[in-house]
Image (spheres, rainbow, N blue to C red):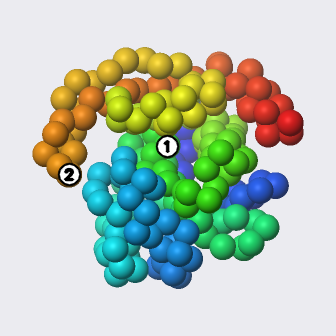
Amino acid sequence: MSALTPRPIALTGTHVRLEPLSVEHLGELFAAGGRDEEVWRWQGGPAPRTQEELGDRLAVLLEEAGRGECVPFAVIHRASGHAIGWTAYMDIDAANERLEIGWTWYGRAYWRSAVNSESKLLLLTHAFEDLDMGRVQLKTDHLNHRSQAAIARLGAQREGVLRRHRRRPDGTWRDSVYFSLLASEWPAAKERLTARLGA
């Protein structure tokens, strides 16, 4: 039996709620991470200088969603009720029971908090337990050591590197480091991730 194709739904945790991304989130998203070069350093372009520039990027993501190429979520910080970033399911292949989690960013004020761990817990739980995926992959720039460490802490296995995989905005070439979690690995990874969030 093949996995189910993801649909836009809300996923709610203790610290964050993931809800379908829309243009209504734009103002809060810009307040959370607009103009911050460090937030956008690994996102494939310079930091948006205006709300309109961030809106252009959001529009691209929503266009891809409209074509069924991804399922984007706004990350809502439950204590404040504000959108503080976005993330997405992408590279979705239900027939082969796999998808990727990517396009993820959060405002810098929420780094080193429970936000990323709980967002990934919600996304991975939904992917494996509701959608019946057999594989979830994540990838990052080979120079983005912070992201690689965060992915490894999820329990994902480093698979390898695609060399000269993507051109950066400055014209240099990035290698992409690939990680994955399999359905058989998920119960143990979920237990560790849940325990870390509880601590």
Decide if residue 98 is on the left or right side of residue 182.
left
Decide if residue 155 is on the left or right side of residue 59.
right
**In the image shown, does 53 or 119 lie closer to the viewer?**
53
**In the image shown, does 66 or 169 lie closer to the viewer?**
169
Label number found at residue 169: 2
- Label 2 CA crowd tier, 10 Å (few <14, some 14–19, many 20+): few
In this rendering, which labeled residue sits more in front, label 2 or label 1? 2
Decide if residue 45 is on the left or right side of residue 123.
left
What amino acid is labelled 1 in the image? Ile
Q: Residue furthest right?
A: 198
Q: Earlier in the sequence, mark 2 or mark 1?
A: 1
Image location of residue 65, percent across then percent down: 40, 62
Which residue position is annotated with label 1?
A: 101
Q: Is residue 184 visible?
A: yes
Image location of residue 76, percent across then percent down: 66, 65
Which residue is at a point 86% across and 39% down the rendered structure image? 198
Which residue is at a point 74% across and 21% down the rendered structure image? 188
- Label 1 CA crowd tier, 10 Å (few <14, some 14–19, many 20+): many
Q: Is residue 104 above or below residue 20?
A: above
Q: Which quadrant of the structure image shows residue 56?
A: bottom left
How far apart are labels 2 and 1 at the CA level? 22 Å
- Tag 2, which secondary structure? loop
Quadrant of image for the N terminus: top right
What amino acid is labelled 2 in the image? Pro
Image location of residue 132, percent across then percent down: 61, 36
Which residue is at a point 79% across and 39% down the rendered structure image? 197
Which residue is at a point 28% across and 57% down the rendered structure image? 45
Asked if the residues shown at circle 2 and circle 1 are in contact, with their CB atoms under 8 angstroms apart, the answer is no
Quadrant of image for the C terminus: top right
Q: Which quadrant of the structure image shows residue 11?
A: bottom right
Label number found at residue 181: none
